[in-house]
Image (cartoon, rainbow, N blue to C red):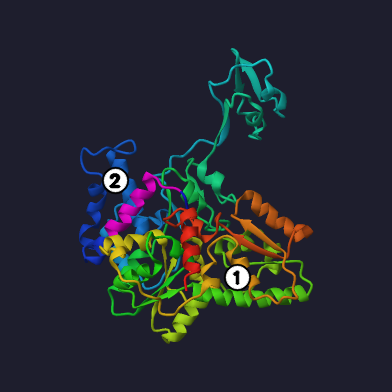
Amino acid sequence: MDSDNHAKRLKKRLLIEISKLAFNDRLKEDIDKLPVKLFPKNAQNIRCCIHKDRAVTKYRIQAILGFKAEDETDETTSLSEYVEIAKKRQNITESNLTVLSDACSACLKGRHYITNVCKGCVARPCTVVCPKNAISMIDGHAVIDENLCIDCGKCLKVCPYHAIVNIPIPCEDSCPVNAISKDENGLEVIDETTCINCGKCMLACPFGAITEQSQIIDVITKLKSKQKVAALLAPAIAGQFPYDFQKVIAATRKLGFDKVYEVATGAKETAITEAKEFEHKMQEGSEFMTTSCCPAYMEFVEKHSPELKEYVSDTPTPMHFTGKMVKDINNEDIVTVFISPCPAKRVEALKDNTIDYVLSAEEYGSLFVAAEIEIIDCDAEKADIDSEENGRGFPVIGGVLSAVKNYVSNNIEIKPVVIDGLDKNNCAILKSFTKGKCPGNLVEVMSCAGGCVGGVNTIETSVKATYKVSQYKDKQ
């Protein structure tokens, strides 16, 4: 992920503040003071007034405590009461994106607009290309009739002065499956029956109105208990911090995790199993096979393109292989926490009994700050089970293909295809593959451009993360 903005910084500050309170056993006592602490009297307000800022902050905190804003039934319930409910929670039963309606700006319908840069030129190509005759000249200036405009964008492309702009609704525009739209009040709502939990809307919203139900309080509660807790670090995490990854492993143990495992270990098993499956499918005459490790893609197939199912690998993900290994080694007497670059992994974990909790890379990083652990000061340590380069390369685009190819027999021809990010266009391309239009036979699909290193929940730019993952991949 390459973006940084004030909405993200506010979220990070809240994660740190709440984690500090939880580590210091002050969460119930001080949680209701947080909105005022962040927006004290006479502070510069972000929205219309400081009271609106505090109200939105309260809903952000509810989400961090693990609750959906849409599920609120009593507005008078205090944050300290939510803390009590959260601490008694034994299992995670749902994990979805949530829209904070108080934070939503109710953006106007996306449309094309002619700015005052228009010169009213003689050529007037905008009026010529418009298929609905929606553009006319008024007082020497082009004007669009919104009742006729179909937002095809042809006028925008031909204007010699670039005077025409497209004003989108960022969250709706970013969703590859049209799962977010306005309700009768003009506020955005997510249709969970069509949402693939890719998180692109959360990243796109400039008001920070879309967030996710966090499990950070559940994890801190387990870390402070007598139960053994294991951290399962996704391969992408190797690129998220400006330090040697083995220092990050050592810092993770300082947080209170009893065991630390690299999910790259399970990635190797995924690659080996997927290679065997690919060979079998090709021998059986299948046209192509797609990878299965991206949970947002799997949700896309399940909800929007069931015709792709027969072409998708049945191989479990690296998260599952690693989780199963950890449970088996410890006789299931251990709490497993997957550290993820992706919100869709929370949904995958709900269907997988080898994973108890999922933390985003953002939440994971916030724990170090809250616990006052300086990663740079930690001595380098290895994970409890070593991984190797084939598994470590999974999070970079093309990494899964590369790993699988290493285990495919030489007599099987591989024609690789890469789908680098799920957007509306790539979703249509994937659907076309079932109609004989696949240009290859082994297809890697990643929801996030650049691979998992570009995930919605990452904290480093994908370029820097790719470089660091490549460095670690080659490290012996």
Give the label on residue 403, or none: 1
Q: Is residue 405 left or right of residue 89?
A: right
Residue type highlighted by circle 1:
Ala
Q: Residue at x 37, y 55 (%)?
A: 73
Which residue, given by chain and number where applicable, does mark 2 sit on?
54
* CA neighbours of label 2 inside 10 A, class few (<14), some (14 to 19), many (20+): many
The crowding category of the residue bearing disc 1, from other C-alpha atoms within 10 Å (few below 14, some 14 to 19, many at least 20), is many
Q: Is residue 27 visible?
A: yes
Dot 2 and dot 1 residues touching (CB under 8 Å): no
- Which one is nearer the viewer's eye here, 190 or 312? 312
* Of residues 341 and 95, the one drawn nearer to the viewer in this rendering: 341
Work out whether mark 2 precedes mark 1 in sequence or the reverse, and give the earlier one. 2
First to last magenta residue range: 3-18
Main SS of residues in magenta: helix
Front-lying residue, 292 or 252:
252
Identify the element where label 1 is drawn.
Answer: helix
- Asked whether, in this view, residue 331 is left or right of residue 34, the answer is right
Q: Position of residue 22 (x, y in %)?
A: 26, 64
Q: Nearer the viewer, mark 2 or mark 1?
A: 1
